[in-house]
């Protein structure tokens, strides 16, 4: 039995504030909690991982002008697959819906923010055909640290200054910011507003792709991946599927239930699996979650529930999550549930990797992935096919 080592980066101990409404303001930002974890290599578990259960793709192999995507495992144009992605902060409260362009994200990361709602961060590598993406909202530090796993250029409108400004202003992050305060060098050229009748102003700000590219050039950011970049996912190769036939079936995935304080319950968020196409379809607020771009329902090939220790930081109900270290996880793919753990011991540039209970890296099926950050302290609210999930320790 492996040892569980949940590394927490928090020195703040606050009273839990049970928020009923969102405290969204366009000038807010998230918090900085993981900088102290940059040098965690010395505490890394040195046990060698077992080999994978399934064949995996070669790293970034090139063929006929195409390259294998780090984000989806599929073949994409080399100009796309060799270019760093962008990470865009997107609100997910009901008053902001629908979002525009979100179905084009290769990876969606979701986590709770103040008010006990969730916010999304789309990781986009194929964004050239989009005119704009959004609406765009403010930064939280655990989103930034997750964006660093993908070597993404981080895009946001506003920030919770006390907790994330130092991180965003550091040389760790290439950020494109429309910030009212806290950012030393904002890039307002990349953003503009679109009139939305009946919507509050904070849900009218968008990232415009052509202007984003201008902003990246203006800031002098490189579009090339760093030389030491490590891909987050390991994918099955072309023509192969990671079937996990011996794992339990999982057809309806609920990251939270009504009344829980982990951020998902009030939204009625869940995924359903369709065996006909092997995709998980997203629902929330009692309806399909759709993209304003084309009305399509959001769907992905893989879903991850990544359990993270969480704390309330202050009387504004700002939250902190430990996205470095180690914790429980569930990976859903091919209609199956693979319980295991995630591990991120290599510092901010190192991605969290996912392992089954026997220590083998979990192989993902090619396609898009949705990662739900599960507030560990409310993990009992997670339901799979109507049943709670129990982990052996």
Image (cartoon, rainbow, N blue to C red):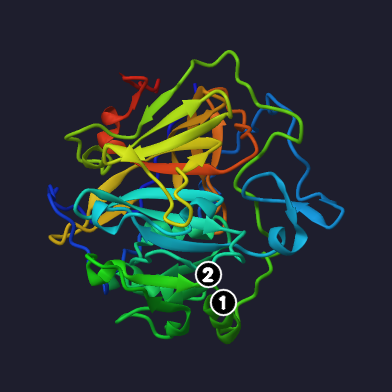
**Residue at figure coordinates x 37%, y 20% from the top left:** 385
Mark 1 or 2: the one toward you: 2
**What separation in Å lies between label 1 and label 2 (alpha carbons)?**
7 Å
Q: Is residue 4 above or below residue 109?
A: above
- Residues 273 and 35: in front is 273
User: Which mark, by number, is residue 237?
Assistant: none
Residue at which label 2 appears: 131
For the point 39% across and 57% down, which residue is it? 99
- Graded by Cα atoms within 10 Å as few (under 14), some (14 to 19) or many (20 or more), the crowding at tag 2 reads some
Left or right, residue 75 beside residue 182: right
Q: Earlier in the sequence, mark 1 or mark 2?
A: 2
Q: Residue 349: percent from the left, percent from the top? A: 56, 59
Residue 292 x/y as whole percent:
42, 55
Secondary structure, mark 1, is helix
User: Is label 1 in contact with label 2 (beta carbons under 8 Å)?
Assistant: yes
Note whether residue 375 is visible. no
- Across and down, in percent, residue 154 comes to 48, 67
Name the residue: 47% across, 79% down.
190
Q: Nearer the viewer, residue 179 or 174?
A: 179
Please give the label number shown on residue 210: 1
Split into 4 quadrants, where in the image is the C terminus?
top left
Is residue 114 rendered to the left or right of residue 110?
A: left
Q: Looking at the image, can residue 95 be seen? A: yes
The image position of residue 279, as x and y in percent, is 54, 33
Determine the secondary structure under disc 2: loop
């Amino acid at each position: 039995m492996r040892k569980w080592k949940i590394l927490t980066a928090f020195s703040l101990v606050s009273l839990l504030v049970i928020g009923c409404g969102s405290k969204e303001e366009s000038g807010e930002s998230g918090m900085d909690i993981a900088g102290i974890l940059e040098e965690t290599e010395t505490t890394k578990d040195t046990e060698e991982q077992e080999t994978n259960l399934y064949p995996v793709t070669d790293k970034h192999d090139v063929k006929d002008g195409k390259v294998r995507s780090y984000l989806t495992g599929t073949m994409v144009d080399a100009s796309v697959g060799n270019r760093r992605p962008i990470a865009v902060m997107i609100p997910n409260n009901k008053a902001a819906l629908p979002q525009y362009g979100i179905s084009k994200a290769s990876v969606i990361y979701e986590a709770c923010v103040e008010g006990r709602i969730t916010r999304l961060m789309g990781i986009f590598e194929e964004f050239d055909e989009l005119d704009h993406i959004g609406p765009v909202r403010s930064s939280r530090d655990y989103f930034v640290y997750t964006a660093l796993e993908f070597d993404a250029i981080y895009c946001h409108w506003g920030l919770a200054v006390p907790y994330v400004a130092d991180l965003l202003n550091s040389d760790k992050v290439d950020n494109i910011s429309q910030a009212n305060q806290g950012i030393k060098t904002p890039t307002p050229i990349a953003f503009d507003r679109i009139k939305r009748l009946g919507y509050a102003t904070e849900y009218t700000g968008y990232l415009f792709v052509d202007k984003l590219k201008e902003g990246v050039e203006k800031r002098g950011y490189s579009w090339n991946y760093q030389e030491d970049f490590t891909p987050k996912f390991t994918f099955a190769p072309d023509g192969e599927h990671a079937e996990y036939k011996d794992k339990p079936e999982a057809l309806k995935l609920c990251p939270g239930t009504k009344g829980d304080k982990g951020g998902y319950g009030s939204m009625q968020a869940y995924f359903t699996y369709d065996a006909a196409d092997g995709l998980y379809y997203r629902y929330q607020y009692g309806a399909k979650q759709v993209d304003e771009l084309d009305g399509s329902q959001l769907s992905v090939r893989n879903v991850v529930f990544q359990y993270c220790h969480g704390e309330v930081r202050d009387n504004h109900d700002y939250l902190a999550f430990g996205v470095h270290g180690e914790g429980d996880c569930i990976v859903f793919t091919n209609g199956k549930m693979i319980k295991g753990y995630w591990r991120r011991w290599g510092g901010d540039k190192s991605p969290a990797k996912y392992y089954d209970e026997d220590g083998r890296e979990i192989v993902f099926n090619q396609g898009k992935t949705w990662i739900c950050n599960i507030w560990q302290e409310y993990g009992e609210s997670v339901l799979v096919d109507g049943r709670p999930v129990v982990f052996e320790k």
